[in-house]
Amino acid sequence: MDQSVAIQETLEREENCITAVQCDVFFDNLTESRLLGLVESTKEHAIFIYTHRRMAVTADDVSLEDIIPISLDFAVVEVSSPEQLAVVGADTKVRVSFQEEDLELRLPFGSHSRFFLSEVNRAWSDVCKSTTQAPKFDWISKYHNATGGQGVVKQALAPLAKLNQHRKTEKSSEKKGSSEKEKGANSGTQNSKQAHAVPESREDRDDLVRSSSHTTSNKAQILAMPQFGLRDNLIKCELLKNENLYTYTEDFSFFLGTYNVNGQMPKESLRPWLSCTATPPDMYCVGFQELDLSKEAFFFNDTPKELEWTKAVSEALHLDAKYALVKLVRLVGIMLIFYVKKKYAQFISDVEAETVGTGIMGRMGNKGAVAVRFRFHNSDICVVNSHLAAHIEEYERRNQDYKDICSRLQFRQLDPTQPLLTIMKHDVVLWIGDLNYRITELDVSNVKELISKKDFETLHSYDQLKRQIDEKAVFVGFVEGEIDFQPTYKYDTGSDKWDTSEKCRVPAWCDRILWTGKNIMQQHYQSHMTLKTSDHKPVSSLLVIGIKKVNAEVYKKTFEEIVRNIDKMENECIPSVTLSKREFYFKDVKYMQRRAETLSLFNDGQVPCQFEFIQKPNESTYCKPWLTADPPKGFIAQGGSVDIELEVFVNRSTAPELNAGKEQIEDILVLHLERGKDYFISVTGNYLPSCYGSSIHSLCQLREPIQDMPQETLRDMAEMVGGDDDRNAEKPLDIPKELWMMVDHLFRNALNQEDIFQQPGLRTEFAEIRDCLDTGIPDSLPGSNHSAAEALLLFLDALPEPVVPYSSYQQCLESCSNASQCEKVISMLPQCHKNVFNYLAAFLRELLKNSASNRLDGNILATIFASLLLKSPTKQDIAEKRKTQEFFQHFLAQGSS
């Protein structure tokens, strides 16, 4: 379990706990457990030492005891010898020194300890190589009261005083008898520090970690070295293959709940929903959607309702058990809260949370998913809470949202050398949320008649989600329990009456709970009609899941046998693989079109092997930015195989160079086998130029579709950007014709379109629109209004230089409160950029004239378009974001020129 969360709660806002590890501290013949946290503030680092309960979940579980500043007086003076480190599974002994005190620690085997030591060593290296003033650690003094006035907060900054009080007497007597000897040793230590050159950069430190020889002073980095990672992975693979030998299953209950609260504050107790089981569940996974529908929440991901609903949940948990909050994650109005019984908290580890937005442009968080993954005993579990696209006819968009979530939501592993984890790479996946699938082919009266008869089986046959699952379009391999409750949407708020509004929505089972994995049984699946806060009803499911637990004695025997076999194999054999092919050609690559081919590796050697795509000389990554290999590294058992997906994807970052002909679809991948040889793989192809990722200046020179132009012409025009050139005597267009086609289409068809620029389109329709713009075929845009609107936003987002050039960005911020100054800034833009800005502003003013039907307002449009037209050359903070919106709003006011 990530105990850094508990430490973070004890810190001031300015400090950040990078990582934490639980370890044993030695006091002569005594051993006591402590929690160590590596804390950063103003680029200074210190190790915070806490006493703690068995498993630290919150700040109440820890107590700050002492602090060790990582300064020039700090050193890692001893680590377990390389011979000890080579035994994977062994604990690591570390001795750290500060001024005249030293401390002996024993860290448990695992990625937590490796990461902690590597980060400590990194911080120490930064201090040693720093040429600026030595760190002062003034910020530490604020923790004076927490440590009782002891330790580092003394004027002498002599930490470890309390931790070493058991041996002070003995140490004092030793000093009297051997002061000269100790002085010589200290001098030797300083000399050894000087003898070992401190790396000049992070890259140099990484090279040092990869080195095959070790000096005393760099032993703290040994744990991160590839040879130990390889051995670790070999053992992990063999342990996984033999998992059934040393594990058994034990049942635990998981309460899953989902509730779309329609932007409301909690008005009633949630106990009828969350405490509906006779016995308390072992885990709670509670999901909310539409937590906050305000513009502040949508555009700034900030809402006071998070605290209110979290409090409502905590007060409604089953009274017959004590629970610990493990994780809370939120994206705009989508929130997931994960609780566990306190007695089981110690068995939770590897907790990670991620979010992904699938709203407009695939980024806005009004739709999307949040997820938490964790390990419970020996089972890896992922919980997803999603809110998919709305409206009855948009089932294809919901399918697309689901696929986007599965592909884009990835978790980093505690071991940074390991590849990212996708949702489906878990033993158990629990999926909850407002999936928004509706009942189709029946009118309101027929649906309500079936509900009144409680003929849910017949009604379920018309359910879009059931049909899409039956067609294997989504949720392949997932299970949903039998639905024997009436639809959970849509009700008049505050009642059990079906929607009586003008739209009179058809009732539907929008709120669902599904799962995939082994040894799972559902105890109940129901809605909770007594809760009336929202136009949805909450849904719950109680699952009993067989969790894998480890038989420690059998595990030890299995582990030892595996180590013996690996020792034998490593001494006898060199790894090798056979590649399915070594040359890949991607024909006619298009903008934002994913293209993939499979490279298969077969381990034809006598030992398991570890592979990794490595960097070529003088290159910072293993491949060009438009190419990825998934997985980029991995492990193949003897006689086994692995499929690697080579994917080419051109986005806004890589398109400009390809459009201009400055970059080609050409790369060489180097596949390296640990302790083996390297293989070279050729990836080539041809890219079809696109208006997406081309500059405004270049597009204004083109009267023909971009794909009809010779590559030499496109290259020449790219070189002309920013200056005049006699090679093109023809008068340029006022605005790019592609921009005109999209805006004209929307002006003629979408002025009254509800939720225009707020609801995403379909990716297939975007592809058709892109091809139309790039080829001129057909001569009118295909697809829905929403797809055309999103295509326009993506076009603006892909411009290499935004409509308001980067050079004018600061002027915009400075003039944002003065309308005349704003107009002056725009009047000074390059002519084609000024034309585009004014053209778009005029179109948006026309949209606002129809706000009664399209539900737009100036704030929404200013927020969406300001982020695209006025981009910061550096990272933009919230204050700057608000200023850009204020700037653009001047041009949306009716009567603006």
Image: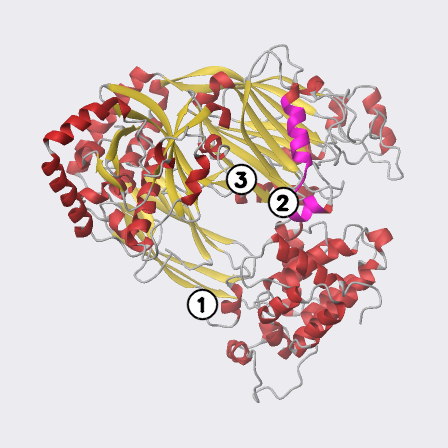
Q: How is the image coloured?
A: secondary structure
The crowding category of the residue bearing disc 1, from other C-alpha atoms within 10 Å (few below 14, some 14 to 19, many at least 20), is some
- Residue 354 has which mark? 3
Q: Amino acid at mark 3?
A: Glu
Q: Residue at x 31, y 36 (%)?
A: 158
Q: Is residue 502 left or right of residue 81?
A: right
- Residue 400 has which mark? 2
Q: Amino acid at mark 2?
A: Gln
Q: Residue 748: in sight, yes or no?
A: no
User: Which segment did they paint magenta?
Assistant: 296-314
Q: Is residue 891 left or right of residue 335?
A: right
Disc with the residue nearer the chain's start (1 vs 3): 3
Look at the picture and state if 470 lies above or below 771: above
The crowding category of the residue bearing disc 2, from other C-alpha atoms within 10 Å (few below 14, some 14 to 19, many at least 20), is many
Q: Amino acid at mark 1?
A: Gln
Residue in front for this viewpoint, 676 or 374:
374
Disc with the residue nearer the chain's start (2 vs 3): 3
The kind of secondary structure element at disc 3 is: strand
Q: Which residue is mark 1?
A: 664
